[in-house]
Amino acid sequence: MKSTRAALNLTVYVALAASLPATLCRAADSVTTTTWLKLSPATSPSARSGPGMAYDPAQKLIVLFGGAAIGHNPDYLNDTWTFNGTTWAQLALAASPPPRQQPGMAYDYAAKQIVLFGGIGRGSTALRDTWTWNGTTWAKRQPANSPTSFPATQLFIGPKNGHADLFTLTSAGLPQTWQWNGSDWVLLSPANSPPARAEAAATLDNATGQAILYGGVTISNQPLTDTWAWDGANWPQLSPSTNPGPVEDAGALYDTQLKGIVMFAGEETGLTWGWIGSNWVQLAAAKSPPVFFDWGIAPNPANGLPVIFGGAGGANSPTDGTWEFVAKQ
């Protein structure tokens, strides 16, 4: 059984390596300095918080969808943009998902499509619809089963077979892990699970072959500071010697400059952290984005470096900055 699973994992990682920008797959030497660089694209989406954002390896583009234009008194958006590493371009589409912020969005390597799930719609409605992006059009899916929607659920590339995995909670506040199989949502049954939460950071760690989930808040809005790993079958809790403290609405992404995960903990501290091996390490970035929250994150198609866009800052004012994380050797 273990050898079969190892073969599945190897297939997923080979597919990931083949489709990501070449520089993202390059081995990294020791990192000495880190910084965030503000990019200056010729065109850019309007200021917003809570956009969905994912990398489309087939098109070699970042895809951004929706968000909210006015923080906690929002004008919800449903526009679609792509980023090629140099500039943003808005797409003119015949059909799009309804306006929303904080949708889950991730690429499904097995189905070869971006999956979008849920989010918060107009009237603060919790949405639970599923859409897929094939590189040119959005398609509304009609799965027989669907997770309960909750704001800021965690949708990420699954480590076992490349499908999109989702960590969320039920209307009763119970944690659940789901997987999109290309046409339907399948409820998984891990022996262990993180406690229910929203607004956690979660992403696949290519170095270890596990997805890492950190922090967030409980349904009573209490901060969490625990770290969990997802191997596609179970959620063991990890015990790092250091952790970033309370973090919510943060973004995380694997970065081969670090050979680990980079996480910008904007809302609470404005600090940048790395998950490297089995521990959290604070990265002394020479420059950082403003202290804000609720942005999108994906690898730059041009060079593989982590890119964040948007977010909300002081007084919940949305931003329109595009920032790139650089680790120098």
Image (cartoon, grey):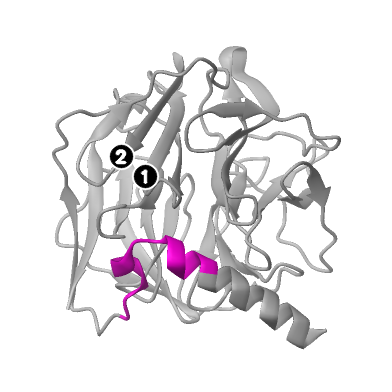
- N-term-proximal mark, 2 vs 1: 1
As for residue 123 lying within the magenta part, the answer is no
User: What's the residue type where badge 1 is placed?
Assistant: Leu
SS category of the residue bearing label 1 = strand
Seen in the image, is 320 located left or right of residue 107? left
Looking at the rendering, the stretch of residues picked out in magenta corresponds to 15-27
Q: Which mark is residue 83?
A: 2
Q: Main secondary structure of the magenta part?
A: helix
Q: Which residue is mark 1?
A: 61
Q: Name above or below for residue 148 compared with residue 99.
A: below
Q: Residue furthest bottom?
A: 3
As for residue 19 lying within the magenta part, the answer is yes
Q: Name above or below for residue 106 compared with residue 139.
A: below
The image shows residue 200 at horizontal and vertical percentages of 55, 51
- Quarter of the image containing the C terminus? bottom left
Of residues 275 and 301, the one drawn nearer to the viewer in this rendering: 301
The image shows residue 5 at horizontal and vertical percentages of 74, 78
The image shows residue 12 at horizontal and vertical percentages of 59, 69
Mark yes or no: residue 320 visible. Answer: no
